[in-house]
Amino acid sequence: MLEFEEYKAKLNAARPSLELLQSALKLEAAHKEIEELEAASERDGFWNDVQNSQRVQKRLKLLKGKCENYEKLCTAWDDMMTMCEMAMEENDDSMLDELKEEYESFSEKVESTRLSTLLTGEYDGNNAILTFHAGAGGTEAQDWASMLYRMYNMWAERHGYKVKVMDYLDGDEAGLKSATIMIEGENAYGFLKSEHGVHRLVRVSPFDAAGRRHTSFAAVEVMPEIAADDNEIELRDEDIEMQVYRSSGAGGQKVNKTSSAVRLIHKPTGIVVSSQVERSHFQNLENCKNMLRARLAEIKEREHLEKISDIKGVQMKIEWGSQIRSYVFMLVKDLRTDYETGSIQSVMDGDLDGFINAYLSMRAAN
């Protein structure tokens, strides 16, 4: 029964953190806003303004989700405390394994929720758009880019986020040259913005018959999705050059072999985006506009600029010395936070929360 007493003590120690979390989440204000939005949605003519009604419903879903998640944490705490007291009273240790599992899950969710309160950036609550670029090195780099593509798809799946492919260009022999995906879910950009940068892999190459060690680089750009009606990020027709071309690549589901692919060039900054995965020219154009707005917003936030006209197009250098993280044999290390892990397979399967949490905690402390 000693273990149940220890868990009861842990739960009592965790209670103040749970109460502090309630304040940090501003739940009282959230409940008040929910009431106001629900009242607004019941007024006559509310659904006539489709854009506004969609925005209100999205905000309601976000606020209700935040409140419900906290209530689930409180319920989990109550259930575990009851479990401890019942086991001690009845001298029954059959629930110990279940308690350990519940407590581990509870602790992870409390930490994740705490970190979400650190997401105070202008776009942190938005969906995230990720673009992958293979560095120099041909097949090696293209294979590494596809490994990163898989890794972030699996991270999204772990967190219940949806993934939409916006662009995909196959590699010459394996992997990919470039790709863009949108990860849809609350705080996706806030969590993933720490992944923006160059990723370096050192491994014995599966493409080298001599079994030599190779170093490969790939870049991941992380940008917030920006709504078309966002006044801060306006795309002017005179600033954009559009090119239409035939899709390339290996084909299959990712690529449509018609002249519907679109490339947009933002003249003031030199930023280039493209999309070729949709069957419709108009859908690819919409993808491009989404990517362009996202890239401008990301640069504006990262460079602390006041307006879009201050942005100058800067190409990320995908090379030695510019990496944010190194993946070397059985060790993955983030060079900004010094967080590291030997569970490289888990990382490649999308277990990135340790890196993300370390980055958010570092930023909060500075």
Image (cartoon, helix red, strand yellow):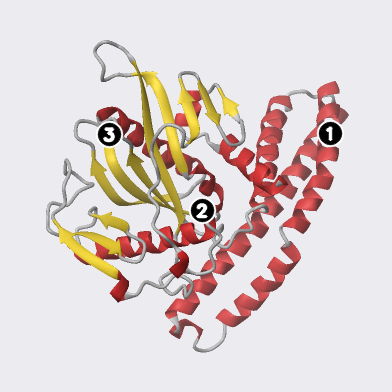
Mark positioned earlier in the residue sequence (3 or 2) = 3
- Residue at left 53%, top 55%? 302
Give SS at disc 2. Answer: helix
Which of the numbered marks, if any, corresponds to residue 72?
Answer: none
* Residue that carries the numbered disc 1 in the rendered image: 8
Mark positioned earlier in the residue sequence (1 or 3) = 1
Please tell me which residue lies in front, 49 or 177.
177
Look at discs 2 and 1 and give the one toward the viewer.
2
Q: What is the distance, in whole Å, between disc 3 and disc 2 at their CAs? A: 25 Å
* Residue that carries the numbered disc 2 in the rendered image: 189
Percent coordinates x, y for residue 217 in the rendering = 38, 33
Q: Residue furthest top?
A: 210
Percent coordinates x, y for residue 287 in the rendering = 31, 61
Q: Label 2: how many residues lie within 10 Å, few (<14), some (14-19) or many (20+)?
A: many
Please tell me which residue lies in front, 44 or 249.
249
**Above or below 30: residue 68:** above
Please tell me which residue lies in front, 95 or 168.
168
Q: Is residue 260 visible?
A: no
Which of the numbered marks, if any, corresponds to residue 175?
Answer: 3
Q: Is residue 79 visible?
A: yes
**Amino acid at pointer 3:** Gly
Q: Label 3: how many residues lie within 10 Å, few (<14), some (14-19) or many (20+)?
A: many
**Residue contact between numbered discs 1 and 3, judged by CB atoms under 8 Å:** no
